[in-house]
Amino acid sequence: MIKSNLINILTSLDVYVPSYSISLLSEYYYIVIKNNNKLNLTRIIDPVDFIYKNILDSYYLLKYISLYNGCLLDIGTGFGVPGIIIKIFLQNLNVYLLDSSLKKCNFLSYVIDKLSLKNIYVLNSRAEQLDKKFLNFFDYSTCRAFGHLLYISEVSLPYLKLNGLLICQKTPKQKSEQKDSKDHIEALGGTFLTTDDYFLNDNIRRNAIVIKKITSTPSLYPRSFNKIRRQIDIAKKSIKI
């Protein structure tokens, strides 16, 4: 059912996706649904909603990825969105899926095996505690619905190469986070590259915030979660004054 819906929706949007990618996306959906009750992976179970809110939402990010054989870190990936979906679209991309939940990481490993995906890896860690060997390692970092932009920036920019891109998906209501985070992002070596509003359909609006790493991140970052949390509180208060 989802396969025919996916083909029809992509055709209506004039989006071409190879048949093997459509088959993988369909299989991925069924794996998620089959394991959802046991693992509590997502509330989005209707196939059409899944297409718009997960597949197309992830597809939109491809416009920012020009190095098709580069390395991407998906922070707080959960059940693999957008990381697994991006990997299905860009087969040569090296993708690292990061999540603190061992249960979800085990599920991700299962998905990777079932879909026979190559050059995609699962990292079980809190973002701020990711192994230091990954500092300055990634070309791209993606993040969806994973905390305040200041926190996302601090746990992403240290791991990006110079000129690497952090791509955050937010709701329009969260735009104020950019003001809260601007100074700290600059301290981390980043700068706002673009902010794009886009619509998945007539009722679903999204916001993509793209940050470019233009200078090296100081070695003290990333800090502990509690220190980052205090920084967020301070930033929010300073903006309100």
Image: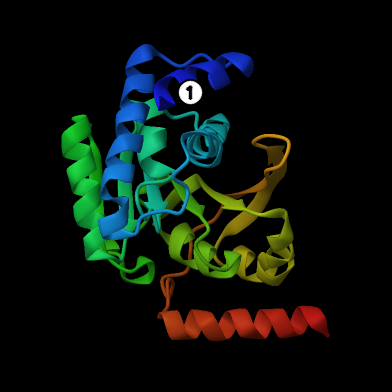
Residue 239 pos. (x, y %): 78, 78
Q: Image point 19% across, 55% down: which residue?
A: 106
Q: Nearer the viewer, residue 8 or 10?
A: 8
Judge left or right: residue 112 versus residue 92.
Answer: left
- Classify the position of the C terminus by image quarter: bottom right
Q: In front: 180, or 1?
A: 1
One can see residue 6 in this view: yes
- Determine the residue located farthest toward the right in the rendered image: 241
Q: Is residue 43 left or right of residue 52?
A: left
Which amino acid lies under the numbered mark 1 shown in the image of this protein? Leu
Is 184 rendered above or below residue 158?
A: below
Quadrant into which the N terminus falls:
top left
In this picture, residue 65 sits left or right of residue 95: right
Asked which secondary structure carries label 1, the reply is helix
Residue 118 in sight from this viewpoint: no
Q: Which residue is mark 1?
A: 6
Up-down: is 105 above or below 22?
A: below
Quarter-of-image position of residue 215: bottom right
Residue at image point 42% right, 46% down? 81
**Crowd rating for badge 1 (residues with CA inside 10 Å; few <14, some 14–19, many 20+):** many
The vertical placement of 222 against 116, above or below, is below
Q: Which of these two is toward me, 90 or 161?
A: 90
Q: Is residue 165 found left or right of 137 in the rendered image?
A: right
Residue 29 % position (x, y): 36, 36
Coordinates of residue 28 in the picture (x, y in percent): 32, 35
State the image coordinates of residue 26 (x, y, percent, origin top left).
Answer: 35, 28
What residue sits 67% from the left and 43% below the top? 204
